[in-house]
Image (spheres, helix red, strand yellow):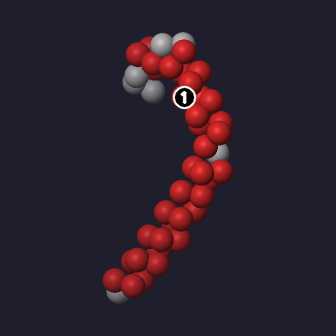
């Protein structure tokens, strides 16, 4: 049972981590853009 959960967790989060890593440049760009235009105005989104 633990192995099943572990493999599910790894496969699911592996995909999420891969997607984040793949989109990291645009995410960093977006973060810079948000910071430049005032991070506080977008604090709740």
- Residue 35 horizontal side relative to residue 19, left or right: left
Q: Is residue 21 above or below residue 30?
A: below
**The C terminus: image quadrant:** top left
- Disc 1 secondary structure class: helix
**The N terminus: image quadrant:** bottom left
Q: Is residue 10 above or below residue 2?
A: above
- Residue 43 horizontal side relative to residue 25, left or right: left
Viewer-side residue, 34 vs 25? 25
Q: Residue at x 65, y 39 (%)?
A: 25
Residue sticking out furthest to the left: 2
- Mark 1 Cα-neighbour bin, 10 Å: few <14, some 14–19, many ≥20: few
Q: x, y (%) of residue 43? A: 40, 22
- Residue 19 horizontal side relative to residue 44, left or right: right
Q: Residue at x 65, y 36 (%)?
A: 26
Q: x, y (%) of residue 32? A: 56, 24
Q: Residue at x 41, y 16 (%)?
A: 40
Q: Quadrant of residue 16?
A: bottom right
Q: x, y (%) of residue 27? A: 59, 37
Residue picked out by circle 1: 31
Q: Quadrant of residue 33?
A: top right
The number of numbered discs placed on residues in the rendered structure image is: 1
Q: x, y (%) of residue 44? A: 40, 24
Q: Is residue 27 above or below residue 33?
A: below
């Amino acid at each position: 049972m633990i192995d099943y959960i572990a493999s599910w967790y790894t496969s699911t989060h592996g995909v999420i981590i891969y997607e984040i890593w793949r989109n990291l440049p645009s995410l960093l760009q977006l973060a810079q853009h948000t910071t430049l235009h005032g991070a506080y105005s977008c604090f709740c989104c």
